Image (cartoon, coloured by chain):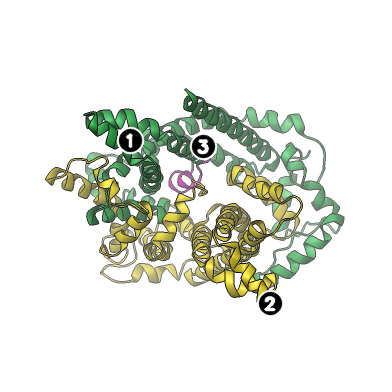
Amino acid sequence: MTTTVPETTRAIVAPGAPRATTRRMPLAFGIPYWVFTGALALIFLYPLIWTAVSSVSPLAGTSQTDGWGFGNYAALTKYQAGIWVYLWNSTVVSVLTVVLTLAISLLGGYAFARFSFPGKNALFLLTLAILMVPYATLLIPLYVILNAVGLQNSLVGVALVITMFQLPFSMFMMRISFESIPKELDEAAMVDGCSSWGALWRVLLHAVKPGLVTVGLFAFLTAWNDFMAPLILINDSNRMTLPLAVANLRGQVQGVVDYGATEAGVVVLALPCILLFLILQRHYVRGFMSGAFKG
Amino acid sequence: MDRHDTHRIRARAHGDPHRTATTPRLRRPRPGLALRRADRDLRRLPFHRPAAARLPDVGLGLAAAGGNQGINFPQNYQDAVTHRLFWDSIRFTLLYTVITTVILIALGLGLALFVQESTRWKGFLRTAFLVPSALGLASASLLFYVLYSPIAGPFADLMKSWGITFLGTPTGALWSTIFLIVWRYAGFYMLLMLVGLQGIPEDVYEAARIDGASRWQTFRDITVPLLRPTFALTTIMCVTGSLLAFEQFYILTKGGPDNSTMTIVQLIYNVAFQGQNDLGVAGALSVIVLLALIVINVFQLRAFGRSDES
C-alpha cells in the first residue's frame, strides 16, 4: 500500500521540482525524528484501525456478539428499515448528485470557456457567489422552499441541494479544464464537420477527463457523507441516508447505545471514501489545491 | 403571527388528519415519482399563492411557516436576540473558533514542514495524515462517539479507574470535540500549507543560506512572511468553518452537557426543528449569523490585505 501511493502525492505536491525541496528546510533526521513522526502517524491512523478491528472483534462492549465475526454488521440489518434500504438511499442520492453535477458542470464549463454570451461574467460570478453563502445559514430557507415545491422528505430534494452546493467548485474546475485545452483542437474538429456538440462529445470529452474525475469524486464524497441536508429534509425513516441512519442508532432503545453496530456502520460509511481516496489520491489532492473546497 | 403555525406545517407534512380542504397539502413524494411531481410543482409554483408567498419571507425574518402571512419583522429578531441561549452560544462558538483555528494552523504548518521533502517515508506520513480528511464529518464524529464511550471505547477501563468522562463535563466535551476536529482536518490544512511552501521561490532560501542564516532565522524571516497569502486563506476557511460548526456537536454532545457546547448553528437547528419549532426566529438567527460572517470575513480580508502592503 505504501509503495505506490506516496509517489502520486509527491508528483502533485511537488510538481516539476520534487527534489528542489530537499534542501529547503532540512529538519532533523535520525532516530528521534523517526520515532516522533511514527508516533504522529499512529495517532492519525489509530482511530481508523481500532474501529475496523473492533467492529469484528468481541471487544466492543455492548455489541450483540461475543466472538470474532460480523455480528455487528448483521445487527445493522435489523435496525428500522435495515442497512440495505439506507445503503440504497445513499446510493440514489450520491448517483443523482454525481450525474447532475457532472452534466451541469461539463456543459457549463464548456459554455463558460468557449462561448461568449451576454452576462457571461456576471453569471459565473453569481455561481461562485454560492461559495460565500454557508450551508448552515441557508437551512431554514432551504427547508421552506423545498417544502413549498413538494420536495421536502424526498431523496431528489436532498440530491438537488447537495448538487447546488457542489456546483461552484465543479464549474470552476471544468472551466479551467476546458481553458487548458488549446482552442485549435475543437476548431479542427469543427473544420472536419463536427458541430459544437460533436466537438464536445468526440474530442473534448476525452481531454477533460481528469477534471471530470476530480469533480465526480468530490461530488460523490460530499453526497455520500452529507449529514445536514438529509437531517433537515428527510423525516421518513425509510428515506434516511446512511450517515443519518447510523447516527440514529444511538436513540434506538432508551439509554442503550449499540456501539458495536455503530462501529460497523462507521466502517460501511468510511470504507468507500477511504478506498476512493487511496485510488484517486492524485485527483483528491488536486481538488483540495484548487482552493475551492469548503472547510 | 401564530406561533403554532410551525407545528401545523410539520404536522401537515406528516399527513395530519386535521388538515382542511383549503390548506395546500404537502406531499411526500416517493422516489420514483419525485421527479415528475417536482416538475409539476415547479410549474405550478407561480400560481400557488400560499406556498410561493412564503419564499421571500424567510430572508426578511418574516413569518416563515405558512398560515398567517403577517409581518413579524422586529418581533422575530427581538425573540432571536433575547433567546436565553443566544449570547451563551455566541460566546461558546467564538471560543471554539479561536482554539480550533490556532491549533489547526499551527499544526498544519508543523506537519507540512515535517513532510515537505519527498522521501518514501514522508509520502507515507502525508497519506497517513490525509486519510482522515476522506471521511465525512458525520462519520468521523460517530467514530469518535464510540471511541469516547465509557463502555465500548478503548479508554473505557482507564476512564473507569480514573473516574473521568470525555464528554461528561463542559471542558471535557469542548476539548474532546476539538481533538476530533483536529484529527479530521489537520491533514487538509497540512496540504494547503504544503501548497503555500511550494510557492516560495528556492533562490530566497539559497540567498539566506549564503548569508549564513540559521534555520530558525530562515523560518522566521522568510518562510512565515512569505506564507502570508496561505495564512490568509487557511485562517478564513478555518474561522468560517468553525463558526458554522454543527455536525460534530450534534453527534457528540447535542449541545450538552447543560447547554455548555451549544454552537450558534446548533441553536438555529434546535429553534427550528426541536421543541419550539419556530422557523421565523430561526430564520432571523440565520440572517444574523450570515451578516456576522460577512463582517468577519471582510475584516479578515482587510487585516491580511493591509499587512501585505506594509
Q: Say if B198 sits above or below A97 in the image.
A: above
Q: Are marks 1 and 2 in contact (CB under 8 Å)?
A: no
Label 1 Cα neighbours within 10 Å, binned few <14 / some 14-19 / many ≥20? few
> Is mark 3 in CB contact (under 8 Å) with mark 2?
no
Query: Which residue is label 1 attached to?
Result: B204
Coordinates of residue A59 in the picture (x, y in percent)? 26, 60
- Magenta-colored span: B244-254
Specify the colour of chain B.
green
Residue A263 lies left or right of residue B3; in this view the side is left
Q: Percent x, y for residue A168?
A: 60, 52
Q: Is residue B229 visible?
A: yes
Amino acid identity at mark 3: Leu
Q: Which residue is mark 2?
A: A193
Label 3 environment density (alpha carbons within 10 Å; few <14, some 14–19, many ≥20):
many
- Name the subunit of mark 2: A
Chain identifier, yellow in the render: A
Identify the element where label 2 is drawn: loop
Q: Secondary structure at mark 1?
A: helix
Sequence-wise first label, 1 or 3:
1
The image shows residue A87 at horizontal and vertical percentages of 50, 69
Please report the residue visible at 82 percent of the width from the left and 48 percent of the height from the top. Answer: B53
Q: Is residue B296 above or below residue A213?
A: above
Displayed quadrant of residue A73: bottom left
Question: Which secondary structure, mark 3?
Answer: helix
Comparing B243 with A14, the one in front is: A14
Q: CA distance from mark 1 to mark 3?
A: 37 Å
Q: Amino acid at mark 2?
A: Gly
Separation of disc 1 and disc 2 at Cα? Answer: 52 Å
- Report in which chain the residue with disc 3 lies: B
